[in-house]
Amino acid sequence: MRHETATSRVSGPVERAFAVLQTVAAAGTPVGVRELGRLSQLPRSTAARLAAQLVDLGMLTRTTGGELTIGPAVATLRSSDGEIRVGLEDRLRPLLLELVDQFGESAALTVDTAAGAHYLAQIAGPSAVQVPDSSGASIPFHVVAPGLVLMSAWSDVRLSHYLGEHLGAATPRTVIDPTKIRDHLAVIKSNGFAWTDQQLDLEVNGVAVPVIDTEGSVVAAISLYGPAYRLNPTTAPSLGAQLAAIVTAAATIALG
């Protein structure tokens, strides 16, 4: 008689999920569900279910046409020597430096992970008034501008799941009401940028925009942070749109 072990119970689903992820990664171009099933040698319904779960985790993402590509969470997978495989930080760090030089505020690169909005890199601005360095930290999505930008690209299933959990507040100004967050995300998606007002740290504001790859998928967010009295929509009403234009142009070159 065959005795089922914990390893044998887990290995099947894990191997199938990995097969889906590996198939999409190897394709090199967006993959539809029907093609995914054929290439991975899985039943179409199984491939579709696993793909949906991987999308919710940020491991896969859907293009505007509904096809699948590797998602932003994969950017945090590291090799044994600690280097980021996908190379987002290496490709976009020069842009962060340019933004610091141009705007005089701290700039950060953030990606979507299961643990939260993960800060791959942050470059401090030249001002004497500095903001905390979040490099290497994972922060709840709803608390920070780049997290909200990443949330605006989520599926409704993933968003509903996140908003259904207890949402903590970092400061008295943190927005934790699900309806207000949904409304804010709709505005962010329309405008192409997000502002936060002292939601993570009192007296610190942030503005963030998405980094979009050649397939039209949001793979990261780039943000500027600074003192609230200096960095806000009133004193810099065009900053969000300006930042979005700069990042879009630079990302086209860096990720092309």
Image: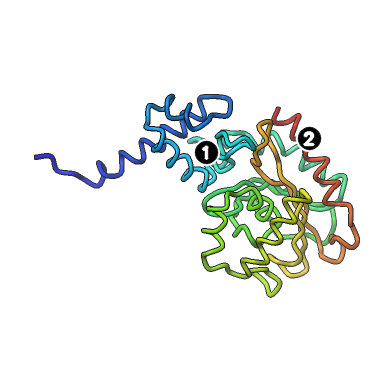
User: Where is residue 149 shown, x and y percent of the image?
Assistant: 69, 51
Q: Which mark is first along the chain, 1 or 2? A: 1
Q: In which quarter of the image is the C terminus?
A: top right
Q: Is 105 drawn above or below residue 20 in the view shown? A: below
Q: In this view, does 74 lie above or below 31?
A: below
Residue 172 image position (x, y, % from top left)? 68, 75
The count of marks equals: 2
Q: What element carries label 1?
A: loop
- Work out whether residue 126 or residue 193 is closer to the camera in this orientation and state it: 193
Residue bearing the label numbered 2: 250
Image point 14% across, 43% down: which residue? 3
Label 1 sits on residue: 78
Horizontal relation, residue 82 to residue 13: left or right: right
Disc 2, SS: helix
Query: Residue lying furthest right in this view?
Result: 235
Determine whether 242 is above or below 91 in the image.
Answer: below
Residue type of the residue flagged with mark 1: Arg
- In this view, the residue in front, 184 or 116, is 184
Amino acid residing under circle 2: Ala
Could you say where residue 222 lies in the image, as x and y percent from the top left?
73, 46
